Amino acid sequence: MKSRLNCYFDPKLADQLTAFALRQGVHRSQLVEAAVTSFLSPDALDRREAAFVRRLDRLSRQMERIERDLTIAIEVQALFVRFWLSASPPIPAAQQDAAKAQGASRYQGFIETLGRRLQRGDSLVREISREITPEHYGRAGPPTGSGDDTGEDAARANADMTGKEGVHVEP
């Protein structure tokens, strides 16, 4: 035998309960009983805790990837700056205007190349991963001819750099 309880609900909640009961083809009291049973059951807390643990694990993995990617980005930038500072000779005052114009042109090319890579979803981290562990990507060596213009961008950047004093570019 079941005990009778009188409960008061907010009118919107009562309407939602009625609509859901009609869609499910059950009585409202059955839905309320199932909800209270679920809320009071000892394994409900365990299920919620397990869900939180899964979410926290996922967030931890995401944070680890972000930290790894940030470390790589910082190291890439540091190596570039170190190389640039050691390989770039000072520019004589007479050539500084031409050098600034050339720098602005190169920067514009860099921004355009970066924009294309970002639109395609290219990532330096993925590119490095493919080069370091090609067996995980089903091919040997760096990606070539895959429909992107990464090689084309590199060739364009190399062409900009060749012939510049103090800069050595491998073909």
Image (tube, rainbow, N blue to C red):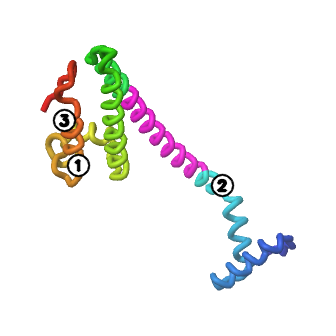
Residue 138 within the segment the image draws in magenta: no
Position of the N terminus by quadrant: bottom right
**Residue at image location 68% in from the left, 70% down from the top:** 34
Q: Secondary structure at mark 2?
A: helix
The rendered magenta stretch, by its main secondary structure, is classed as: helix
- Mark 1 residue element: loop
Find residue 159 and name its label: 3
Dot 2, how many residues are within 10 Å of its Cα: few (below 14), some (14-19), or many (20+)?
few
Residue indicated by mark 2: 42
Question: Residue 83 location, x and y as percent?
Answer: 29, 20
| Residue appearing at x 51%, y 43% in the figure | 59
Callout 3: helix, strand or loop? helix
- Find the distance from the CA under tag 3 to the CA under tag 1: 15 Å
Quadrant in the picture for residue 88? top left
Q: Is residue 2 left or right of residue 20?
A: right
Which stretch did the figure color magenta? 49-74
Residue 4 lies left or right of residue 64; in this view the side is right
